[in-house]
């Protein structure tokens, strides 16, 4: 499902964490696992904790340094439990997932995205973090903020899956529904403006600024014909209720 | 922090999962752990996986049945990996967390909230699930949908913490981008639904279909925080005008 997304574990100490990572990945539809110099792997503890995600362990790619794991990756997120004063943008897992999915949905993007996790005790080194475009900071209480490695992977893969589920194209039927015509869109915008003036949300003498923002918003959504009809139906009911 | 929230593990088989649960709880500011008939506890493996959350293990309350663990609880969420045909509302972890926090923020609520997790292999029994007000279903791929027990606890405690953090006023420090938070979006959708029912555009007993289409539409637009504020402003004016 997420064929262009890699999970990269660097210098993992406990084989159990590798297995638990594989399970978390498989639960959420990820399959590409890269291991940079794992201390002990393969190992029965990894297989046990994978609990059926053996295929991901078997396909795992073992490399000797982070650069090898990142070859072919255009967007790289590094996780960090500690606050660092590095000049890199910090995002939370939800923001990272939304960003990753919106880039994957761009048909011009054909490279890979990596999520990099450091060694259990120390995390990623500053040098490793500087190979990343973004740092992910998992919100946690201040005096106990270091999560288990596989738990961190679980949260990030869960957010990816949630972002995926929430942006799923509705149903196969809808692919055949036509986008709204420019004329219909324009009629909708004019109707919207008129109703917003009626409810005194817009100043009649200066509706421009807010209307521009609203047009931008709805244009981004690429409205379908049926959706425009729903929105116009809502406006009609608002007008009717106010006139009652 | 979440003094009124209990994590209840029923019939846990592996002590490691109890330790990992304690760590996940402490990471996210929870402290009340109830164990219903754990197979092996205490145990060095639990302490090892707790990785410093020993205080939560030491304070854990061991009981002989679920009812004892739920005494004093008014709102009970039960996790379930399998689809069951029980007449209980199913929510995802994010919805559960938002609901739990909104109830906790009600000053009239002085009882407790429980999140109940079943045995590793079998999950909660139907009888146990019927003691719950809501079922939580963690979204996952269909043919590999059973998460590790402690990983499930981690996701739910993470969502609680996220819901808590995102209802805090933003600080100048945060690097948050302009995208609306999931919580704010959810509040907007709830407000939208309420207004659409008021104007009689939605049938109050069956708002699902149209709300799903509208969510899909706005999700596609990837709303920014400011846009959500504009939309909520419009809804507020509609409501005001109708009440006038």
Image: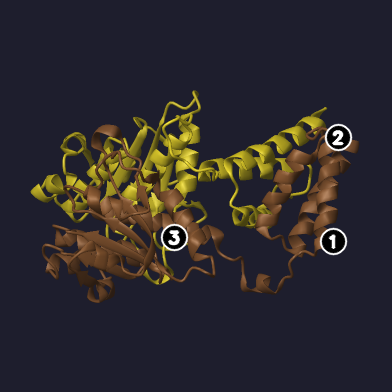
Chain colours: A brown, B yellow
Dot 1: element: helix
Q: Which residue is mark 1?
A: A183
Total marks shown come to: 3
Asked whether residue A97 appears in the rendered view, the answer is yes
Dot 2: element: loop
The circle drawn on residue A161 is 3
> What's the distance in space between the residues labelled 2 and 1, CA to CA?
23 Å
Residue plotted at (17% across, 66% down): A46
Q: Is residue B2 left or right of residue B36?
A: right
Question: Is B203 or B176 nearer to us in this picture?
Answer: B176
The circle drawn on residue A204 is 2
> Counting residues from the N terminus, which is met first, the one under dot 1 or under dot 3?
3
Question: Is A85 or A200 nearer to us in this picture?
Answer: A85
Q: Tag 2: Cα neighbours inside 10 Å, few (<14), some, or many (≥20)?
A: few
Q: Chain of mark 3?
A: A
Q: Is residue B143 above or below residue B46?
A: below
Give the percent coordinates (x, y) of residue A152: 30, 52
């Amino acid at each position: 499902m997420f064929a262009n997304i890699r999970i990269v574990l660097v210098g993992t100490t406990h084989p159990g964490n590798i297995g638990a990572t594989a399970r978390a990945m498989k639960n959420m539809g990820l399959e590409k696992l890269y291991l940079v110099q794992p201390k002990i792997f393969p190992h029965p503890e990894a297989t046990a904790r994978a609990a059926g995600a053996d295929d991901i362990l078997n396909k795992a790619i073992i490399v000797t340094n982070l650069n090898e794991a990142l070859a072919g990756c255009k967007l790289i997120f590094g996780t960090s439990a500690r606050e660092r004063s590095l000049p890199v943008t910090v995002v939370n897992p939800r923001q990272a997932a939304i960003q990753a999915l919106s880039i994957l949905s761009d048909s011009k993007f054909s490279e890979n995205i990596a999520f990099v996790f450091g060694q259990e005790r120390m995390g990623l080194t500053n040098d490793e973090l500087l190979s990343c475009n973004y740092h992910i900071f998992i919100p946690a209480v201040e005096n106990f903020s270091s999560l288990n490695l596989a738990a961190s992977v679980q949260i990030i893969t869960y957010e990816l899956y949630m972002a995926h589920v929430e942006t799923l194209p509705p149903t196969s039927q809808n692919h055949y529904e036509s986008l709204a015509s420019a004329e219909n869109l324009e009629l909708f915008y004019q109707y919207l403006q008129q109703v917003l003036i009626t409810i005194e949300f817009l100043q009649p003498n200066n509706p421009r600024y807010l209307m521009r923002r609203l047009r931008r918003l709805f244009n981004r959504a690429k409205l379908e014909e049926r959706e425009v009809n729903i929105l116009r139906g809502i406006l009609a009911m608002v007008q009717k209720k106010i006139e009652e």
